[in-house]
């Protein structure tokens, strides 16, 4: 555990990436606000620098005068306010999570905002656990939408679901090569395909690399999805399409991000740990991970690392 003798030395270390766990139904901006507020509170509770000094001249002007140095009480926090405020921090997220999604969220603090930008344009793959329920369809494809229809699901078995999921994954992998920016019948495309999975040329088009059912207890089921360029509504639509192909209906009940690049749930800080000491320790951990995996910051290949 790192101990700080004063607030100034602690503030200088707050430059980097932190990994936190985002609860559902909590906006990312609120998480950012809570973390910065906690940092300001903890920094202001640490021992502060000594007050500034000012020169004071006493006595009559026609006689020898006394010069002395006294504390400048205009520099006292009781007079000028707390030393650290929210405007002293810069914070941005590497990739965004929707309001109803939960899971891993990477944030850049101060100089770490440059790292979060590189992670964002590097587009590391993310893994999700997407929970769904059979038998009902909503207008938003999520649990909070208005019910549009109800269907039976007794005919849906694990074998049928695995078969449909395999077809969906194959279709997405075909799309992966179509979005590579190369001609499908060219030699270059063949050589890229022989080496493994590749990234799409367009950063706005979602691509699914892995799709499997990890829990099936009708009407509830859970899919594990590995993808890039995805967003929450796209994952909701995926659950809806799965229900249609199963000749039933389905809607999404929850989305959890379990991995982003080399960061997983073990690295994420829970809400009770969004404090100065835990944040600095997590920042050191994230720095080590990024040093060991530079491809998260600088993508030099079209292939997935």
Image (tube, helix red, strand yellow):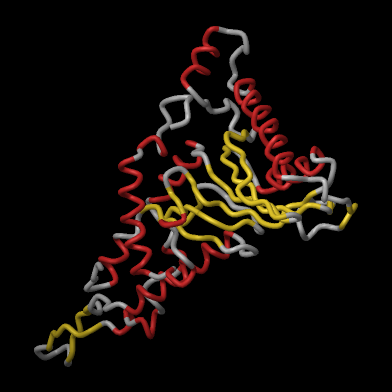
Q: Nearer the viewer, residue 108 or 234?
A: 234
Residue 93 lies, in percent from the top left, at: 51, 52
Q: How many marks?
A: 0
Q: Is residue 24 left or right of residue 289?
A: right
Residue 158 lies, in percent from the top left, at: 70, 44
Q: Residue at x 62, y 33 (%)?
A: 207
Q: Is residue 80 left or right of residue 176?
A: left
Is 192 situated above or below 279? Answer: above
Is 21 situated above or below 243? Answer: below
Image quarter hosting the C terminus: top left
Q: Residue at x 49, y 23 (%)?
A: 196
Res 5 → quadrant = bottom left
Q: Residue at x 41, y 79 (%)?
A: 81
Image quarter hosting the N terminus: bottom left
Q: Nearer the viewer, residue 187 or 281?
A: 187
In this view, the residue farthest toward the right is 149
Q: Nearer the viewer, residue 72 or 139?
A: 139
- Residue 301 visible? The answer is yes
Q: Residue at x 35, y 44 (%)?
A: 290
Is 82 situated above or below 244? Answer: below
Residue 223 lies, in percent from the top left, at: 64, 47
- Residue 90 visible? The answer is no
């Amino acid at each position: 555990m790192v101990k700080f003798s004063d607030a100034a030395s602690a503030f200088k270390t707050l430059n980097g990436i932190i990994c936190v766990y985002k609860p559902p139904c909590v906006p990312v901006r609120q998480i950012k606000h809570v973390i910065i507020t906690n940092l300001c509170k903890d920094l202001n509770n640490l021992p502060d620098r000594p007050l500034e000094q000012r020169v004071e001249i006493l006595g009559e002007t026609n006689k020898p005068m006394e010069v002395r140095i006294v504390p400048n009480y205009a520099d006292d926090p009781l007079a000028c306010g707390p030393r650290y405020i929210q405007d002293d921090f810069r914070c941005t997220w590497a990739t965004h999570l929707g309001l109803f999604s939960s899971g891993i969220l990477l944030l850049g603090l101060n100089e770490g905002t440059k790292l979060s930008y590189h992670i964002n344009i590097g587009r590391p793959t993310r893994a999700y656990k997407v929970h769904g329920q059979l038998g009902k369809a909503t207008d938003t494809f999520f649990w909070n939408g208005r019910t549009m229809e109800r269907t039976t699901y007794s005919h849906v078995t694990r074998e049928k679901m695995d078969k449909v999921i395999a077809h969906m994954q194959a279709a997405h992998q075909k799309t992966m090569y179509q979005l590579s920016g190369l001609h499908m019948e060219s030699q270059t495309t063949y050589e890229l395909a022989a080496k493994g999975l590749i990234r799409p040329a367009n950063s706005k088009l979602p691509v699914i690399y892995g799709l499997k059912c990890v829990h099936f207890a009708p009407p509830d089921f859970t899919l594990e999805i590995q993808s890039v360029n995805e967003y929450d509504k796209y994952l909701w639509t995926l659950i809806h399409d799965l229900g249609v192909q199963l000749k039933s209906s389905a809607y999404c009940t929850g989305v959890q991000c379990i991995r982003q690049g080399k960061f997983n749930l073990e690295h994420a800080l829970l809400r009770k740990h969004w404090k100065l000491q835990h944040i600095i320790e997590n920042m050191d951990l994230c720095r080590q991970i990024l040093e060991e995996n530079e491809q998260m910051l600088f993508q030099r290949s079209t292939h997935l690392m």
